Amino acid sequence: MHLVRNQTNAATGVGNAAYATTEEMRAIFTGDFEFLYWIARVITGEPGLAQRAMERVKHINESGRPPFRDWLFHWARMTVARASAREVQGPILAAASRYMSTACSHELHELLNAEQFATLGAIDISRFIAELDPLVRAMLVLRGILHCSIFECAIVLNTPARCANMAYCKALQWVKAQGVVLQ
């Protein structure tokens, strides 16, 4: 599983149009399907829900306003992450309630780099699902891989920022336990 994006799949700017074309939007979901599906699968925890999230995104990209061409890959990742989080909103909120009374002793948690992504990609997805709750999985993707701020994550997941921060702290502890070297 390749978590680091293949740059050859990037939309190439044709002409002066600032917005991605329908063809470019379809191409990003075709060319980067494996990575986008991995995001959906980790967050939802179930193949059926991941597939449903991917289908919802397909309809969004066909009927919505196109993103800026330069933001196309980021838009695709975030759209898949949001759709996936919606599929498991109940379990995410249930998990968040467990983090309300806990606090993290350190504020700044690092983002994961390309080498760390690659190490995570080699881990069987069933381990993520078995060992991490839905909020921690979502935070691992949103904060660790997509590099969203804690506050962006809290908005996407509809959880308090404190809970999102604690869940990311737990995600990094799990990543470290998998042998991924953190800075």
Image: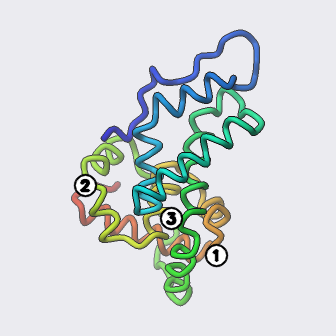
Q: Is residue 106 above or below residue 80?
A: below
Dot 3: within a 10 Å radius of its alpha carbon, few (fewer than 14), some, or many (20 or more) residues?
A: few
The residue to which callout 3 is attached is 108
Q: Earlier in the sequence, mark 1 or mark 3?
A: 3
Q: Is residue 167 above or below residue 25?
A: below
Location of residue 150 by image quarter: bottom right
Judging depth in this view, the residue of 16 and 125 nearest the camera is 125
In the rendered image, residue 42, in percent from the top left (x then y), is placed at 41, 57
Location of residue 179 by image quarter: bottom left
Q: Residue drawn 48% across and 24% down?
A: 9
In terms of secondary structure, where does tag 1 sit? loop
Q: Disc 2 residue type? A: Asp
In the rendered image, residue 25, in percent from the top left (x then y), is placed at 62, 29
In terms of secondary structure, where does tag 2 sit? loop
Which quarter of the figure is the N terminus placed in? top left
Q: Residue drawn 61% across and 45% down?
A: 57
The residue to which callout 2 is attached is 124
Q: Disc 1 residue type? A: Pro
Q: CA distance from mark 2 to mark 3?
A: 28 Å
Judging depth in this view, the residue of 80 and 110 nearest the camera is 80
Q: Earlier in the sequence, mark 1 or mark 2?
A: 2
Residue 160 is labelled as 1
Dot 2: within a 10 Å radius of its alpha carbon, few (fewer than 14), some, or many (20 or more) residues?
A: few
Dot 1: within a 10 Å radius of its alpha carbon, few (fewer than 14), some, or many (20 or more) residues?
A: some
Q: Residue drawn 53% across and 53% down?
A: 52
In terms of secondary structure, where does tag 3 sit? loop
Q: Is residue 84 left or right of residue 118?
A: right
